[in-house]
Amino acid sequence: MTSSFIEIHALDKTFNMGKVRVRALNKVDLSVAENAFCLIMGPSGSGKSTLLNLIGGLDRPTAGTIRVGEDHLEKLDENALAVFRRKQVGFIFQTFNLIPSMTALENVIFPMRFARVPNQKRKETAVRLLKQVGLSNRAYHKPTELSGGQQQRVSVARALVNRPQLILADEPTGNLDTASGESIMELLSELHQSGTTIVMVTHDPRLIPYATRVVEILDGKIVNDSSPESTNPTISDPKKQQEQNE
Ligand SMILES: Nc1ncnc2c1ncn2[C@@H]1O[C@H](COP(=O)(O)OP(=O)(O)OP(=O)(O)O)[C@@H](O)[C@H]1O
Ligand SMILES: [Mg+2]
Protein backbone atom coordinates (compact mmCIF):
# COMPACT_ATOMS: atom_id res chain seq x y z
CA MET A 1 0.00 0.00 0.00
CA THR A 2 1.44 3.34 -1.05
CA SER A 3 1.18 6.40 1.19
CA SER A 4 -0.36 8.70 -1.38
CA PHE A 5 -2.67 8.12 -4.29
CA ILE A 6 -1.26 10.79 -6.59
CA GLU A 7 2.45 11.58 -6.57
CA ILE A 8 3.75 14.40 -8.75
CA HIS A 9 7.41 15.29 -8.97
CA ALA A 10 9.13 18.26 -10.67
CA LEU A 11 6.30 18.66 -13.14
CA ASP A 12 6.88 21.09 -15.97
CA LYS A 13 4.68 22.00 -18.88
CA THR A 14 5.75 24.49 -21.53
CA PHE A 15 3.53 25.32 -24.48
CA ASN A 16 5.32 26.44 -27.64
CA MET A 17 3.25 28.86 -29.68
CA GLY A 18 5.51 29.78 -32.57
CA LYS A 19 8.08 32.09 -31.05
CA VAL A 20 6.23 32.42 -27.77
CA ARG A 21 6.84 29.90 -25.02
CA VAL A 22 4.40 29.71 -22.14
CA ARG A 23 5.58 27.92 -19.03
CA ALA A 24 2.23 26.79 -17.65
CA LEU A 25 3.70 24.64 -14.85
CA ASN A 26 7.01 25.24 -13.17
CA LYS A 27 8.52 22.35 -11.17
CA VAL A 28 5.36 21.34 -9.37
CA ASP A 29 5.62 18.77 -6.57
CA LEU A 30 2.36 17.50 -5.12
CA SER A 31 1.13 14.40 -3.38
CA VAL A 32 -2.54 13.75 -2.80
CA ALA A 33 -3.79 11.18 -0.29
CA GLU A 34 -6.23 8.48 -1.19
CA ASN A 35 -9.81 9.71 -0.68
CA ALA A 36 -8.77 13.38 -0.55
CA PHE A 37 -11.17 16.02 -1.82
CA CYS A 38 -8.54 18.39 -3.17
CA LEU A 39 -9.38 21.82 -4.57
CA ILE A 40 -7.01 23.54 -6.98
CA MET A 41 -7.46 27.30 -6.85
CA GLY A 42 -5.70 30.27 -8.41
CA PRO A 43 -6.22 33.07 -10.91
CA SER A 44 -7.03 32.63 -14.58
CA GLY A 45 -4.03 31.39 -16.54
CA SER A 46 -2.17 30.12 -13.46
CA GLY A 47 -1.99 26.52 -14.74
CA LYS A 48 -4.93 24.81 -12.99
CA SER A 49 -6.45 23.10 -16.03
CA THR A 50 -3.00 22.21 -17.32
CA LEU A 51 -2.25 20.42 -14.03
CA LEU A 52 -5.60 18.61 -14.02
CA ASN A 53 -5.18 17.49 -17.64
CA LEU A 54 -1.73 16.10 -16.93
CA ILE A 55 -2.97 14.17 -13.87
CA GLY A 56 -5.73 12.68 -16.03
CA GLY A 57 -3.37 11.72 -18.84
CA LEU A 58 -5.12 14.03 -21.32
CA ASP A 59 -1.78 15.65 -22.08
CA ARG A 60 1.91 14.88 -21.52
CA PRO A 61 4.28 16.92 -19.36
CA THR A 62 7.40 18.60 -20.76
CA ALA A 63 9.32 17.18 -17.77
CA GLY A 64 8.64 15.52 -14.45
CA THR A 65 6.71 12.48 -13.29
CA ILE A 66 3.15 11.63 -12.26
CA ARG A 67 2.01 8.48 -10.53
CA VAL A 68 -1.68 7.81 -10.03
CA GLY A 69 -2.30 4.69 -7.98
CA GLU A 70 -0.07 2.06 -9.54
CA ASP A 71 0.24 3.85 -12.89
CA HIS A 72 3.41 5.80 -13.72
CA LEU A 73 2.02 7.95 -16.51
CA GLU A 74 5.37 8.69 -18.19
CA LYS A 75 5.87 4.96 -18.71
CA LEU A 76 2.56 4.49 -20.53
CA ASP A 77 2.33 4.57 -24.32
CA GLU A 78 -0.70 6.20 -25.98
CA ASN A 79 -2.80 3.03 -25.81
CA ALA A 80 -2.00 2.35 -22.19
CA LEU A 81 -2.70 5.99 -21.36
CA ALA A 82 -6.12 5.70 -23.03
CA VAL A 83 -6.85 2.62 -20.92
CA PHE A 84 -5.72 4.51 -17.80
CA ARG A 85 -8.09 7.40 -18.60
CA ARG A 86 -10.97 5.08 -19.26
CA LYS A 87 -10.54 2.81 -16.25
CA GLN A 88 -9.14 5.02 -13.53
CA VAL A 89 -10.44 8.52 -14.18
CA GLY A 90 -13.85 10.17 -14.40
CA PHE A 91 -13.71 13.62 -16.00
CA ILE A 92 -16.19 16.43 -15.37
CA PHE A 93 -15.83 19.69 -17.32
CA GLN A 94 -17.22 23.18 -16.93
CA THR A 95 -19.00 22.95 -20.29
CA PHE A 96 -20.39 19.44 -19.64
CA ASN A 97 -19.01 18.08 -22.98
CA LEU A 98 -22.06 15.93 -23.72
CA ILE A 99 -22.68 14.66 -27.25
CA PRO A 100 -25.55 16.87 -28.51
CA SER A 101 -27.16 14.29 -30.81
CA MET A 102 -27.43 11.70 -28.02
CA THR A 103 -29.98 11.39 -25.23
CA ALA A 104 -28.92 11.54 -21.58
CA LEU A 105 -29.04 7.74 -21.47
CA GLU A 106 -26.94 7.36 -24.63
CA ASN A 107 -24.39 9.85 -23.32
CA VAL A 108 -23.97 7.78 -20.16
CA ILE A 109 -23.77 4.51 -22.12
CA PHE A 110 -21.14 5.98 -24.50
CA PRO A 111 -18.00 5.39 -22.34
CA MET A 112 -18.98 1.73 -22.01
CA ARG A 113 -18.54 1.16 -25.75
CA PHE A 114 -15.17 -0.55 -25.23
CA ALA A 115 -16.23 -2.64 -22.25
CA ARG A 116 -17.00 -6.29 -22.81
CA VAL A 117 -20.51 -5.96 -21.44
CA PRO A 118 -23.78 -6.91 -23.13
CA ASN A 119 -25.97 -4.03 -24.35
CA GLN A 120 -28.71 -4.76 -21.84
CA LYS A 121 -26.23 -4.58 -18.96
CA ARG A 122 -24.85 -1.25 -20.26
CA LYS A 123 -28.32 0.16 -20.35
CA GLU A 124 -29.06 -1.07 -16.81
CA THR A 125 -25.86 0.58 -15.54
CA ALA A 126 -26.73 3.88 -17.23
CA VAL A 127 -30.28 3.79 -15.88
CA ARG A 128 -28.95 3.17 -12.37
CA LEU A 129 -26.44 6.04 -12.64
CA LEU A 130 -29.06 8.47 -13.97
CA LYS A 131 -31.20 7.49 -11.00
CA GLN A 132 -28.25 8.11 -8.66
CA VAL A 133 -27.90 11.68 -9.99
CA GLY A 134 -31.66 12.25 -9.79
CA LEU A 135 -32.41 12.25 -13.51
CA SER A 136 -34.48 9.11 -14.10
CA ASN A 137 -37.22 11.23 -15.62
CA ARG A 138 -34.90 12.84 -18.19
CA ALA A 139 -33.20 9.74 -19.66
CA TYR A 140 -34.58 10.32 -23.16
CA HIS A 141 -33.92 14.07 -23.27
CA LYS A 142 -31.10 15.45 -25.39
CA PRO A 143 -28.67 17.97 -23.85
CA THR A 144 -30.49 20.97 -25.40
CA GLU A 145 -33.65 19.76 -23.66
CA LEU A 146 -31.96 19.85 -20.25
CA SER A 147 -31.01 22.69 -17.91
CA GLY A 148 -27.33 23.37 -17.25
CA GLY A 149 -27.56 21.69 -13.84
CA GLN A 150 -29.23 18.64 -15.37
CA GLN A 151 -26.60 18.44 -18.12
CA GLN A 152 -23.88 18.51 -15.50
CA ARG A 153 -25.63 15.71 -13.60
CA VAL A 154 -25.61 13.64 -16.80
CA SER A 155 -21.89 14.30 -17.09
CA VAL A 156 -21.38 13.18 -13.46
CA ALA A 157 -23.28 9.96 -14.25
CA ARG A 158 -21.12 9.50 -17.35
CA ALA A 159 -17.95 10.04 -15.28
CA LEU A 160 -18.99 7.20 -12.95
CA VAL A 161 -19.59 4.55 -15.60
CA ASN A 162 -16.29 2.74 -15.21
CA ARG A 163 -16.23 3.12 -11.40
CA PRO A 164 -13.14 5.36 -11.39
CA GLN A 165 -11.02 5.70 -8.28
CA LEU A 166 -10.32 9.29 -9.25
CA ILE A 167 -12.67 12.10 -10.30
CA LEU A 168 -11.08 15.12 -11.99
CA ALA A 169 -13.41 18.09 -12.24
CA ASP A 170 -12.51 21.38 -13.95
CA GLU A 171 -14.81 24.12 -12.60
CA PRO A 172 -17.83 21.79 -12.66
CA THR A 173 -20.03 24.47 -11.08
CA GLY A 174 -18.60 27.36 -13.12
CA ASN A 175 -21.55 27.57 -15.53
CA LEU A 176 -24.26 26.77 -13.00
CA ASP A 177 -26.58 28.81 -10.82
CA THR A 178 -26.05 28.49 -7.06
CA ALA A 179 -28.70 25.81 -6.47
CA SER A 180 -27.55 23.61 -9.36
CA GLY A 181 -23.94 24.07 -8.27
CA GLU A 182 -24.84 22.92 -4.77
CA SER A 183 -26.55 19.81 -6.08
CA ILE A 184 -23.41 18.93 -8.07
CA MET A 185 -21.28 19.51 -4.95
CA GLU A 186 -23.61 17.24 -2.95
CA LEU A 187 -23.11 14.51 -5.56
CA LEU A 188 -19.34 14.93 -5.45
CA SER A 189 -19.47 14.90 -1.67
CA GLU A 190 -21.34 11.57 -1.69
CA LEU A 191 -18.72 10.12 -4.03
CA HIS A 192 -15.99 11.37 -1.75
CA GLN A 193 -17.68 9.76 1.24
CA SER A 194 -17.89 6.48 -0.61
CA GLY A 195 -14.10 6.52 -1.06
CA THR A 196 -13.43 8.27 -4.38
CA THR A 197 -10.49 10.66 -4.58
CA ILE A 198 -11.52 14.00 -6.06
CA VAL A 199 -9.33 16.73 -7.52
CA MET A 200 -11.35 19.75 -8.52
CA VAL A 201 -10.46 23.13 -10.00
CA THR A 202 -12.59 26.02 -8.83
CA HIS A 203 -12.62 29.79 -8.50
CA ASP A 204 -15.33 29.68 -5.87
CA PRO A 205 -14.16 30.02 -2.23
CA ARG A 206 -17.65 28.99 -1.07
CA LEU A 207 -16.73 25.43 -2.05
CA ILE A 208 -13.79 25.23 0.38
CA PRO A 209 -15.90 23.58 3.14
CA TYR A 210 -16.36 20.52 0.91
CA ALA A 211 -12.60 20.04 0.63
CA THR A 212 -10.02 18.21 2.71
CA ARG A 213 -7.23 20.06 0.97
CA VAL A 214 -6.83 23.37 -0.86
CA VAL A 215 -3.87 23.88 -3.18
CA GLU A 216 -3.35 27.34 -4.62
CA ILE A 217 -1.32 27.91 -7.73
CA LEU A 218 0.07 31.08 -9.20
CA ASP A 219 2.16 31.35 -12.37
CA GLY A 220 2.54 27.59 -12.56
CA LYS A 221 3.76 27.14 -8.99
CA ILE A 222 2.09 25.99 -5.80
CA VAL A 223 2.05 28.99 -3.47
CA ASN A 224 -0.25 27.71 -0.76
CA ASP A 225 -1.34 24.31 0.48
CA SER A 226 -3.74 23.82 3.37
CA SER A 227 -6.07 21.25 4.87
CA PRO A 228 -9.12 23.22 6.02
CA GLU A 229 -11.34 22.09 8.85
CA SER A 230 -14.24 20.44 7.14
CA THR A 231 -17.80 19.71 8.14
CA ASN A 232 -17.52 16.46 6.24
CA PRO A 233 -17.57 13.58 8.77
CA THR A 234 -15.45 11.20 6.65
CA ILE A 235 -12.41 13.39 6.92
CA SER A 236 -12.35 14.03 10.65
CA ASP A 237 -10.50 10.70 10.81
CA PRO A 238 -7.13 11.83 12.26
CA LYS A 239 -5.15 9.23 10.31
CA LYS A 240 -6.54 10.51 7.02
CA GLN A 241 -5.92 14.11 8.05
CA GLN A 242 -2.33 13.25 8.79
CA GLU A 243 -1.88 11.58 5.40
CA GLN A 244 -3.27 14.63 3.72
CA ASN A 245 -0.88 16.89 5.55
CA GLU A 246 2.14 14.91 4.40
N1 LIG B 1 -2.91 24.30 -25.47
C1 LIG B 1 -2.27 25.39 -25.11
N2 LIG B 1 -1.43 26.03 -25.96
C2 LIG B 1 -0.76 27.13 -25.59
N3 LIG B 1 -0.85 27.71 -24.38
C3 LIG B 1 -1.67 27.13 -23.49
C4 LIG B 1 -2.43 25.96 -23.81
N4 LIG B 1 -3.15 25.62 -22.71
C5 LIG B 1 -2.88 26.54 -21.79
N5 LIG B 1 -1.98 27.45 -22.23
C6 LIG B 1 -1.41 28.58 -21.46
O1 LIG B 1 -0.92 28.06 -20.25
C7 LIG B 1 -1.24 28.89 -19.14
C8 LIG B 1 -2.06 28.10 -18.13
O2 LIG B 1 -3.31 27.77 -18.71
P1 LIG B 1 -4.44 26.97 -17.92
O3 LIG B 1 -5.51 26.67 -18.89
O4 LIG B 1 -3.83 25.83 -17.21
O5 LIG B 1 -4.93 28.08 -16.88
P2 LIG B 1 -6.09 28.01 -15.79
O6 LIG B 1 -5.46 28.23 -14.46
O7 LIG B 1 -6.88 26.75 -15.97
O8 LIG B 1 -6.96 29.28 -16.18
P3 LIG B 1 -8.57 29.53 -16.15
O9 LIG B 1 -8.93 29.79 -14.71
O10 LIG B 1 -8.75 30.74 -17.00
O11 LIG B 1 -9.23 28.29 -16.71
C9 LIG B 1 -1.98 30.07 -19.74
O12 LIG B 1 -1.07 31.13 -19.89
C10 LIG B 1 -2.46 29.59 -21.07
O13 LIG B 1 -2.56 30.64 -21.99
MG1 LIG C 1 -8.84 26.37 -16.60
Image (cartoon, rainbow, N blue to C red):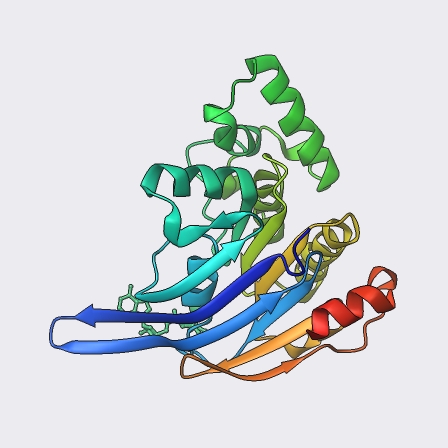
Q: Is residue 44 left or right of residue 201?
A: left
Q: Nearer the viewer, residue 113 or 206?
A: 113
Q: Is residue 187 above or below residue 27?
A: above
Q: Is residue 185 left or right of residue 88?
A: right
Point out residue 77 in the picture as x, y percentages from the top left corner.
33, 43
| Residue drawn at point x = 69 percent, y = 38 percent | 135
Q: Quadrant of ligand 1?
A: bottom left
Whether residue 174 is visible here, answered yes or no, is: yes
| Residue drawn at point x = 63 percent, y = 28 percent | 126
Total residue callouts: 0
Point out residue 17 in the picture as x, y percentages from the top left corner.
17, 70
Point out residue 206 in the picture as x, y percentages from the top left corner.
70, 76
Q: Is residue 159 above or below residue 110?
A: below
Quadrant (top left/top right/bottom left/bottom right) for the C terminus: bottom right
Point out residue 134 in the picture as x, y percentages from the top left corner.
73, 41
- Image quadrant assignment for residue 239: bottom right
Q: Nearer the viewer, residue 49 or 7?
A: 7
| Residue drawn at point x = 47 percent, y = 25 percent | 113
| Residue drawn at point x = 67 percent, y = 35 percent | 130
Q: Residue furthest left?
A: 19
Q: Is residue 202 left or right of residue 241?
A: left
Q: Is residue 142 above or below residue 148?
A: above
Whether residue 207 is visible here, answered yes or no, is: no
Q: Is residue 50 above or below residue 160?
A: below
